[in-house]
Amino acid sequence: MAVRKIVHIDEDLCDGCGDCVPSCAEGAIQIIGGKAVLLADNLCDGLGACLGECPQGAITIEERDADDFDEEAVHDHITHMPDMGPVDLGALMGGRLTAAPLPGPGHGHGHGHGHGHGGCPGSRMQHFPVAPAAVPAAPAAAPTPTAAPAPAGSELRQWPIQLHLVNPTAPYFMGAHLLLAADCCAFATAEFHQRFLRGKALAMACPKLDQGREIYRQKLTAMVDQARLDTITVMLMEVPCCNGLLGLAQEAVAAAGRKVPIKLVVLGVQGQVVREDWC
């Protein structure tokens, strides 16, 4: 047990609407007795994906003594959640099952936002069929051969790119426009290089799986203060477990001695831009 960030639910403010329940990928929040309840400290990763879902402002992040976040306990919990049914997440969590205290049958309240797939919404397998290309009519005469357009080049200006590995005072960060992107973004949109990365330095991270959030915050604060970033563009996916990346950037700027504007770009799981604006 150590002091760490963890969700706090104000029982007096909570009206039991349940909007927060589906936003918690770990299933750590359930409605019990008409109120949202954090079932166990070790089920909460402290990233705060549920924060923006509470219309009453009853959910905050606090720092206190709490059990460490335990992915194995989350795995066991999710596979036994009464409203989800058994789910095989062995491949996702390494095939390991461990015992963890689970709520009794009386605690399995439905919340009206069932995760039919179980587990993190961002981990649900989806297949997007490609629309068949139209077959053109045969030309009357053979067309004149034309050169194929050259493929667009990479806009990557540096290496490494993982936030875990970069030096916050590296030359390519000095006075730069930073693109802070969730790992999945580059694979979701074909426009990643030409539209979003061009002219920017890059740092990539996964707010769901990466460890060392405080180290990440310190690195970003150093980029703002020492590398004197010009702007930060936070790019993330629309799945709930990605939301922590924006909060990380905002915390880093708040802790810095100078302020820089933050732009948010949110991608849908098929690569479409669902939001793009300055925070």
Image: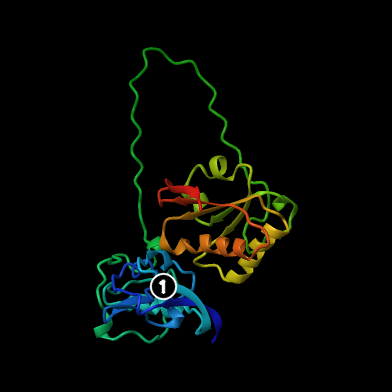
Please state if 10 lies on the left or on the right of 47 as rendered. left
The picture places residue 217, in percent across and down from the top left corner, at 61, 66
274 versus 244 height, above or below: above
Q: Residue drawn 32% across and 72% down?
A: 87
The picture places residue 17, in percent across and down from the top left corner, at 28, 70
The picture places residue 11, in percent across and down from the top left corner, at 35, 80
- Depth check: give the residue in front, 74 or 217: 217
Question: Can residue 96 be seen?
Answer: no
Is disc 1 surrounded by few (<14), some (14 to 19) or many (20+) residues within 10 Å?
Answer: many
Please state if 178 lies on the left or on the right of 146 as rendered. right
Please state if 108 lies on the left or on the right of 177 as rendered. left
Image quadrant holding the N terminus, namely bottom right
Q: Disc 1 residue type?
A: Ile
251 versus 197 height, above or below: below
- Depth check: give the residue in front, 29 or 209: 29
Quarter of the image where one finds residue 20 = bottom left
The picture places residue 152, in percent across and down from the top left corner, at 57, 36
Residue farthest top in this picture: 141
Q: How is the image coloured?
A: rainbow
- Depth check: give the residue in front, 190 or 23: 23
The total of numbered circles placed on residues is: 1
Q: Residue drawn 37% across and 87% down?
A: 101
49 versus 156 height, above or below: below
Quarter of the image where one finds residue 29 = bottom left
Q: Secondary structure at mark 1?
A: strand
102 versus 140 height, above or below: below
Q: Residue drawn 61% across and 71% down?
A: 214
Residue farthest right in this picture: 171
Question: Can residue 243 be seen?
Answer: yes
Label 1 sits on residue: 59
